[in-house]
Structures are given as C-alpha cells and as structure tokens.
Image (cartoon, helix red, strand yellow):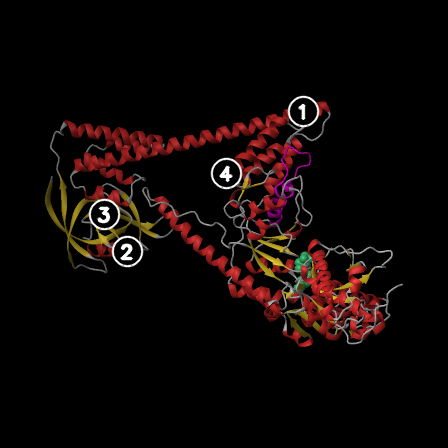
Amino acid sequence: METTRTTLTLPVLPLDDAVVLPGMVVPLDLSDAEVRAAVEAARAAAPAAGKPEVLLVPRTEGRYAAIGVRGRVEQTGRLADGDPGALIRGLTRVRVGAGTTGPGAALWVEGTEVAEELPDPLPGAVTELVTEYRALITAWLRERGAWQVVDRVQQIESPGALADNAGYSPFLTTEQRVRLLEATDPVDRLRLATTLLKDHLAEREVADSIAKDVQDGVEKQQREFLLRRQLQAVRRELSELTGDGGAGEAEDDYRARIEAAALPPEVHKAALAEADKLERAGDQGPESGWIRTWLDTVLEMPWNITSEDTYDIAEARAVLDADHTGLQDVKDRIVEYLAVRKRRAARDRTAAEAADGAAQLPEGPAPAAPRDRRPGGAVLALVGPPGVGKTSLGESVARAMGRDFVRVALGGVRDEAEIRGHRRTYVGALPGRIVRAVKDAGSMNPVVLLDEVDKIGSDFRGDPAAALLEVLDPAQNHTFRDHYLEVELDLSDVVFLATANALETIPQPLLDRMELVQLDGYTEDEKVTIARDHLLPRQLERAGLDPAEAAVTDDALRRLAGEYTREAGVRGLERAVARVLRKIAASGESGESSLPVTIGPDDLRGLIGRPRHTPEAAHDPAERRTAVPGVATGLAVTGAGGDVLYVEASLADPETGGAGLTLTGQLGDVMKESGQIALSYLRSRGAELELPVGDLKERGVHLHVPAGAVPKDGPSAGVTMITALASLLSGRQVRPDVAMTGEVSLTGRVLPIGGVKQKLLAADRAGVTTVIIPARNEPDLDDVPAEVLARLDVRPVSDVRTVLEVALTPGRRPVEVAA
Ligand SMILES: Nc1ncnc2c1ncn2[C@@H]1O[C@H](COP(=O)(O)OP(=O)(O)OP(=O)(O)O)[C@@H](O)[C@H]1O
C-alpha cells in the first residue's frame, strides 16, 4: 500500500555498513568527507528557519539502495570521541530517483516520499502480529535489562514504526536492516522484523545450551579437581599418621603432565589408565614404582616432535665433503640414496594428499594402493674396517639431512629384549634400544646408526636379528611394539643406517634389506690429508693448542701413518697425533721447549719413541721373516681390514712326528681345506716342479699361520701355503718384497678371491712391492687408488707355477733335514 506523495530534492548522505530507519536518531561523524559534504550542502539549501535535511541512503559495495530515509539534522557539535558530529533523525522512507544539481560538493537526487497507509481499524491478524512482536521484543529487552527501551516500545502503536524500531537491534546484519528499509509495506515489514527476531532467539537458545554444556563440563572437571585435592589431603594426613613421607602429590602431577604432553590418542589413553592405576595403588602400592618409571618413559618420548627435512642434494653433498676427505664413491652412493629418498618422500606426499582428497568425497574412488611407507627403501650399510669413518659418516648424513643423530651399539647383543625391551613385569625392565634411541634423539625421525650389525648374536634369549628385521621392515615398522612400552611406535620416518666390519657374519635376512657401501681403507697419502685437514685440527683443540703454536709437517704425519701405525683406518693415527700434541703441550707448559714449534719426521722419536711398524723390507735381511725357506707372505682381509700374514711350513721329524698335515694358528675350516689342497697338489705335481716331494709322503707337514690369537679363514691363502711348502722343499727363500693372495685348485689353477683393494692397500702399508693376484681379479684393480698401483708391481697369474717363479729366490739351498 504505497501512494506517491511529494517529490523532494535532497543531498545524498551515503551510509556504509549502516542503515538508519525512520524514527531512529543517530549520531554521524562529520569528519567523514561525504557526510560533511551532504550536511553542508543541506545547510546551504535549507530555509533560514528550517533544519537542514539529507537523504540517508545505505550503500553496499558502492551501490546505493533503492530506498533511502529523509533525515533531519537536529544538531551539530562534538561526538563522544571529540570528533565533529551531527545528530540526525530518520523521518520517512524516500524512493531514490534521478540525480540532479544542488549547492555544495554533495550528490543531489530527486526522490519521492513513500507514504504508509493502513486500514483502520487494523485487521485481527495484524493486531495479533503486533502483540506477538511486542511480547517477543520486550521479553528480549527485559532479559538484557533495557528497561527504558521496553517502555518506549510499549508506546509504539503503528506496526510500521514498531518494525522500524528494530533498526536498533544489535543482532541484525546490515543486509537484514536494508531488507527492513526496503520493505515499504508496514505489515510486511513487521512480519520480517518478527521472523528476524525469532531466528535470533532460536540461535541464541542453541548457543546457550552449548554454553550450558560447556559449563557443566567445567563444573565436572572442577568437582573432579576438588575431589582429587581432598584425596591428596587425606593421603597426606594418613601418611603423617603412619609416618611415611612423600604424599601423593605426584599422581596429579602425572595427570597434568599427560594432559600437557599432547600424546597420540592411543598413548594418551594408555597413559591415563596407568595414572589411574597409580592413584588406586597409592604410594605404598608395590606397583607404583614401575608405573612411575613407565609413565616417565612415555612422557619423555618425543611423540609429537619431528624435525623438518630441509636439505637439498647439493647442500648434502657439501656437508659430506666438509666432514670427510676423499671417499668419493662412498659419498656418491650416499648422495644417490638421499636423492632417491627425497624423491620418494615427495611422491608419497603427493599420493597421500590425493588419497586424503579422495577420502573426503562420500563415494570417492578407492584409496591409493598401500605404499611402501619408507621413503628411502633399503637400509644403507657402511661396511669396512675400523676407523675408516663409518660412524662419523653416519653423523654426517644426519647433519646433511638436518636430523638428529643417535648411535645404537649392537656389538655383543644376544638378547632379543635388548632390541625390543623387557615386559614391564620384569624387575628392572627397560625399553629396548630402539625406543631408547628415539627418546635420546628427541625426535621421531632421527638418523639411527645401527653400529656393528655383524656382531649381533643369538642364543636362548631369542633372536635380536629377527627383532631388528621388524624394525627395518617398512611394512611393519610404522606399528613397532616395544615389550616395555606396549604402545605402538611409528618408526617409518626414521632413517636407519648400519655399519659392519665384515659381511660374512651379518644374518642373511638382515643383509637382504641392506644396500651395501664398502669402505676399504685409506692409502698413506689419503691418511696424510685426513690427518692434516681433520685429525690434527681436532686434536690441537683437544690439547688446548692454537694452530699457530704447533704445526706438524706432512712428512711427519706420513711417518706417523706409515711407521707408528699399521691400520686400514685412521683411528690409531688420530691417537698418535694426539700423543704428539700432548707431549708438545706438556713441554710447552713446563718450559722445556718454547712455542711455537713445528714437528718434522725426525722429531717424532724424541716425542713418542721409536716407530713400531717399520716396513719388513727395511729390516736387516737376516731378520726378515722370510729369511728362512718355508715362510711366505700372504695377504688377507680380517675384521681390521687388509693385512699381511705369514705362512710358515715345516716338516716333522720322521721318527717322532707322524705323517699327515697339522695346521695351527686358529684357522677356519675353509683355510684348513686350503692347506689340504696345497699338500695334495704338491704331492701329485711337485715332481713336475722339480721339488723333492718324497719328503712330503714320509714326513708330517706342519703349516702355521702366526698371530695365533686372531681367527683366520677363507680360501685365499692357498697360493701362500703352496709357496711356503715349495720354499721349504726347495730350500729357496721367498722374496721378502713379494706378497700374494689366491685360491688354488687341485690342478694348480689360481682362482679369484675377494678384497683385492683392501689387500693391496695392506701390502702397500707393509712396504711390499710385488703383489701376486689371481688373473681373474684383474678388473678389481680399477678400484685400487692409482698412487698405490704406481708403487706396486702387480702380477696377475692363473697358474701356481707362475707364482713360484715370481716368489721364490733363485738361490738354492738344500733342506737341512734333522737327522
Ligand atoms: N675420510 C675421512 N675424513 C675425515 N675424517 C675421517 C675420515 N675417515 C675417518 N675419519 C675420522 O676417523 C675417526 C674414526 O672414524 P669412525 O669412528 O667413524 O670409524 P668407524 O669406521 O666407524 O670405526 P668402527 O667400525 O670401529 O666404529 C673419526 O674421528 C673420523 O672423523
């Protein structure tokens, strides 16, 4: 019911995010340029006696509403905040028409006033609506304590004005207010105002009931808290009565710690259950001790901590290079491993995201096929002699990946519980080493170095290797269960590395999971570089010396490596360097010598005594081990890397010693067989070689490999045994500068062996210059550093005859047979 009345020309006062409805009186801020422009324009146009009038039009996102409200500027002055302001009263609705001109900077429009007409008397439905709205709004206002407003609302008679008064309701949105403004029919408007109010009341009811639930929850917690406090107090009093110290403060403490620790849901549940048990058991309970230990362990685990992998491959390489000299191929392998790991991690992430996305769809496609959860695949195993840097490479890998590092020493572990923990019911039960490693690392994705996997054994206490296999298996290790911890531990993000001295004793199933990287040991030159760049700086620091105070020349380092130590790695060398520096520090301190000093090779003797390992070839010929016939130099790989070993042969006294073969020196079965084969070969073919083999048939033969405390095995001493025997029989010495390795067949063929690089490095260390190797091992020479090959005369052979030709000196001395 809208009849057009007057046409008006008014300056527009735009209202952003606000609506003024007829009947409302609102303050407007005159420091706003548009508001000021409109008010000033209105003032300019107003008749001398009358008050200026503006058209208040809501504006949303730059667009004006179709209906505005004629507003009268009642007053100007200061607003509460001190800004200039105007008090404006909304009068009537005006339909906004075309733009026009007028004084001032404001926008002028023409508008037509909207008249409101209602039938008189009002129809019953409308009266009811008025009553309903009034009841609702007064109830709401009363609730909020707005008593004056209640009175005012009670006095409003007209349905339209009643609805317009809703403009004051704080819960309405601007959009809802605009709808009220644009509802030109008064009854429609009141209907709208009623609906909006009812909606609000309904919403508030829901919110209230939620708040009430929350409140109830809080009350329950408070009650629980109070009860616990009381329980505590009772316990304390009890313990005072009975004279036991230490009241049950701790249980509540555990509960709080559990809540604070943000444990995974399962763990949280288990921990709370234990805390409950602890409370029930009380302090006197026999169980309380181990429950506490368990809770402490669980709370100390880094459940929610994972370090972020930030490495890129070039950086990782740089870290490896900075920490270790040489080892190019080893570093290449590690970098490849990291690159693959990184790619797979990225791929798995994408797959996981895709799967998550699919899972959110109600009828999504089947989730992606189960993936190998370990991004890196197999476990990288660093295999090589002691002191070649396996452990420190592991540390470097962690550093390169930006992860925490922990080492788990497995040497001598025979008990499965060492890996997997003891059940809690055992006295003194502990979690296994894997759990302890993760705890020590302080994050759930550390690099864990399983040191000396070749030295785990098994006995009646279970098989640690089997437990270890589960730890390393990507299909199982995301739910690893430690017997002690009893809750599942996700190990799938852990990077496992392993080290071993020798492959032979690694249990096969473990070996299958490993990707092997061999470290064979260093040449003398490499050792000098490592010592200069890494060992010396570190030991200087340990000795409290400044690099400017003490220098050790490369030649001195070389002598330390060559004559004071004999090893594949650099551990002994590092110790020797440390000894030298300690002496320097001591003599500097006692004033015996003045710093700075430079240590050359000849100073070493005065500092740390005579060298222990002079090369065999440097000895007086009469003192060499091969000075007597029957001794040959062999090459072997032991747990300590490559080494030279000597094989001694002798014939037993025909009267006292029986016939047959005696083998001594802790030889393994395979090595013993080599002895048998050597003897058989010489018995059958010796004559062809012009050897007096008759002795072999009548007299017992004894083969001994000294350094008897070290177990030795393998077939590669075959050539050495034959050479020693042939030397004995022929009376020709074995050349002291020759060492050899190779398996021998019954027909005298020289068969290939392993560990060529380690053996050649050892030969070079020992000062040997000619090395006999099986012809079929020639390709292995590619792995041997060029500088070593340059010093060695390597003779690849395929027949034992050639071995003897090379190894035996021409000079012939008859065997002195003891009569
Ligand atoms: N290439 C190298 N560059 C720098 N330092 C090295 C290198 N190789 C070894 N080292 C240093 O030699 C020392 C011994 O190495 P490490 O303890 O890692 O040997 P390992 O092979 O793990 O021996 P083990 O098998 O007995 O544990 C370490 O201090 C290490 O930093």
Mark 4 or mark 2, which is nearer to you? 4
The residue lying at 65 percent from left, 66 percent from top is 750
Give the answer, above or below, for where 73 lies relative to 642: above
* Residue pointed to by mark 1: 237
Queried on whether the Cβ of the residue with tag 2 lies below 8 angstroms from ligand 1, the answer reads no
* Residue pointed to by mark 2: 36
Mark 4 or mark 1, which is nearer to you? 4
* Residue pointed to by mark 4: 265
Q: Is residue 803 visible?
A: yes
Q: Which residues are magenta?
A: 416-441
Residue 347 is situated, as x and y percent measured from the top left of the image, at: 43, 55
Residue 643 is situated, as x and y percent measured from the top left of the image, at: 72, 64
Q: Secondary structure at mark 3?
A: strand
> Do residues under tags 4 and 3 come within 8 Å of each other at their CB atoms?
no
Ligand 1, seen in the image, is in the quarter at: bottom right
Give the answer, above or below, for where 25 lies relative to 729: above
Whole-angstrom CA distance, mark 3 to mark 2, is: 14 Å
Q: Quadrant of the C terminus?
A: bottom right
Give the answer, above or below, for where 519 lies relative to 267: below
Query: Disc 3 or 2, which lies upstream in sequence?
Result: 2
Indicate the amino acid at tag 3: Arg
Whole-angstrom CA distance, mark 4 to mark 3, is: 64 Å
Asked if residue 15 lies in the magenta stretch, the reply is no
Q: Residues within 10 Å of mark 4 (few under 14, many from 20)?
A: few
Query: Disc 3 or 1, which lies upstream in sequence?
Result: 3
Mark 2 or mark 1, which is nearer to you? 1
Indicate the amino acid at tag 4: Pro
Q: On the image, which quarter does residue 283 sit in?
A: top right
Mark 4 or mark 3, which is nearer to you? 4
